[in-house]
Amino acid sequence: MNSHRVMLAALSAMLSLIGANAQASLRCGTELVNLGETIEQVLAKCGPPDDRRIEEPALRSDGTPRLGAVEVQRWIYGPSNGAYRYLRFVDTRLVDIEMKRGP
């Protein structure tokens, strides 16, 4: 009985973290950027990032993408008021927004 409560509490905590991350957004001037937006939408609202790193999809020996392979882009804006904004795109969709102080 007690182990069920512990499992429920852990599951509830995990779900609340997932829910909080799903609400992540970023303000660029007067525009608001939300998870799920495309690279083009973010560029239109925020302009080009200060740094951009692209991880190409993994390829087979014949040069074709492996099954399930995706392109990942990591963007950095900042510093702005001492904070950096880190964005991660998977196959052109924004999947993560993080803000940190310092590099």
Image (cartoon, rainbow, N blue to C red):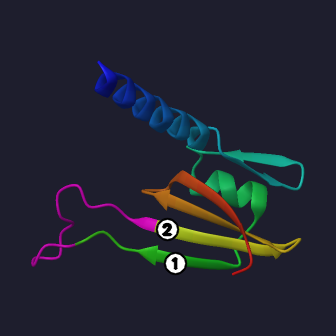
Quadrant of the image containing the C terminus: bottom right
Q: Residue at 33% of width from left, 23% of height from top? A: 2
Circle 2 — which element?
strand
Residue labelled with disc 2: 73
Three-letter code for the amino acid on which mark 1 is drawn? Arg
- Hey, which quadrant is residue 19 in on the image? top right
Query: Is 4 above or below relative to 11?
Result: above
What is the residue that sits farthest to the top in this orientation?
1
Q: Say few, some or many: other residues with alpha carbon within 10 Å of mark 2 (under 14 / 14 to 19 / 20 or more).
A: some
Circle 1 — which element?
strand
Would you say the residues marked 1 and 2 are in contact, meaning their CB atoms lie under 8 Å apart? yes
- What's the mark number on residue 53? 1
66 inside magenta stretch:
yes
Question: Closer to the camera, 10 or 33?
Answer: 10
Q: Residue at 64% of width from left, 59% of height from top? A: 98
- Of helix, strand and loop, which mostly describes the magenta segment? loop
Q: Residue at 36% of width from left, 73% of height from top? A: 56
Q: In the image, residue 36 lies at what x, y percent? A: 55, 43
Query: Is 8 above or below relative to 24?
Result: above
Q: In the image, residue 52 lies at what x, y percent? A: 58, 77
